[in-house]
Image (spheres, rainbow, N blue to C red):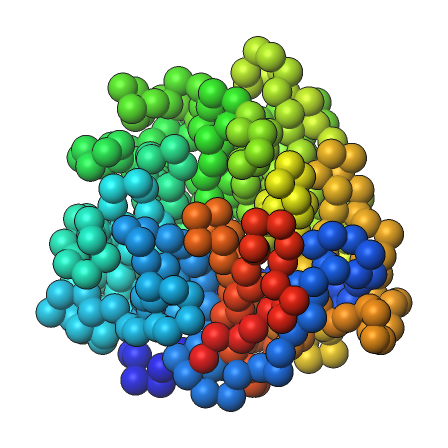
Amino acid sequence: MRSSVKISASRAGLAAAVLGALAIASLSSCDNSYPIYGSIQQEKPGATAGIFYMASVGRALAFNGDYFVHRANIAVSPDGSSWNLVNIGSLGTGYFCTGLAATSTALYAVIDSQVPDQGMGLYSSTNGSTWTLALADPTSNQTSSPMIDNVFVANNAVFVEFHNENGTTGTSTAGSTDDTYTLSASFNGSAFSPVVFGNGGASSSTMPLLGAAYADGAYWIIAKDGLYASAAFSSTSPSGSFSQVTESGAPPTGAAIDCIMASTSTPSTLFLGTDAGAVYKRTTGGSGIGSGLWSNAGSLTYAVTALAEVPVSSTATAILAGLGANSSTTASLSISYGYIQLDPTSLTWLSGDSSTIIPNSTNYDTTLSGKPITSFFYDPVGKIFFASTDSANLSGASGLWTTTWSGSSWSSNGWSPVN
């Protein structure tokens, strides 16, 4: 994060909460007899300079032939190797980005300017270089009016989260018990409309809303208090109500869910990662919401807050899960962070994934320099896999790592830090 970026105390707390909600820790090593680990688990020494050095890096994505990732600013690259900071109109690079997402036709970023009341809100771009303020923050005074905190996309629906710091407890920390969160949604550039969600049709939540996915003919929203779904919500009915999911075997009501992913190989299948360290898998029961079939991988010590599905052959995929500090712990130098693999069919952790295994010539360290992972992104077109990491537990190394898939195997060079 650049020291020149100055934001309000309220926004500073938000930025920490956004990255904290994404941060994950992992087991320290693995057995490379499993396909995905056999080649990419090796890694080069961490970077010692560059825009990602010592940075907390958030979501990476592909748009309009380029790669984008957000840290303090947004960075862009044509190839995943050379990066430049993105200028947002008259703000230049003097802004702080707390959310980044893309549909097939537009890129969206939640931006906080360095100047109070100026340039704050949701920006959009159709080419990644020219930006328009699509939705302005109502005000920078967060004692009574909501600010835009996050943006996420599912099936070309754009969801924008508003955070209202009510201030009755005298705190401006995101996630305070008196805070409320609401959503608005847009389809294909349409005006944003309020989304109704919550038990009993409530219009707001007291917990942050963290992501969305589309699977089994329905939209799914995750929050720090559970999983919500709507089959009625669509491009023709953007105000369709979301209700908390109570299917047998689903995460219990009130469970904090940190990440969500619709399977790319089986689009009707949904994966969730929880603060309690479990990965849940939902397959279709044939009748939409209410009929889902759930299974879960046993809980781990740390939260699961990033998931990725990546190829291991022309016909098979693997699931990688990032682990991190949960709501009852904080990132620590005494813990080695990274990721772990599980079987996507049986949803069992592979036996080689154990913190008791000591790396040697045939069993490599997968800690990505010991840092918590904040996000995964695999681009099936460019065949590049990105791992974004947080600087919370380590004072050095890069915040962004990449490796590549040839179409039949992962790079023998393993992970490389991006400068």
| 312 vs 117, nearest the viewer | 312
* Quarter placement of the C terminus: bottom left
User: Is residue 132 visible from the viewing direction of this image?
Assistant: yes
Instruction: Tell me residue 279's x, y (percent).
Output: 69, 43
Farthest left residue?
90
Q: Is residue 381 left or right of residue 295?
A: left
Instruction: Tell me residue 338's x, y (percent).
Output: 67, 65
Give the vertical position of 10 relative to 121 (above or below).
below
Instruction: Tell me residue 313's x, y (percent).
Output: 66, 44
Farthest top residue?
287
Residue at 48 percent across and 75 percent down: it is 418
Give the vertical position of 77 relative to 291 (above or below).
below
Residue at 75 percent across and 72 percent down: it is 365
Residue at 61 percent across and 20 percent down: it is 284
Farthest bottom residue?
48
User: Is residue 166 visible from the viewing direction of this image?
Assistant: no
* Quarter placement of the N terminus: bottom left
Task: Count the marks.
Answer: 0
Q: Is residue 92 left or right of residue 174?
A: left
Give the vertical position of 196 relative to 108 (above or below).
above
Residue at 70 percent across and 27 percent down: it is 294
Give the vertical position of 272 relative to 366 (above or below).
above
| 153 vs 414, nearest the viewer | 414
Instruction: Tell me residue 335's x, y (percent).
Output: 73, 73
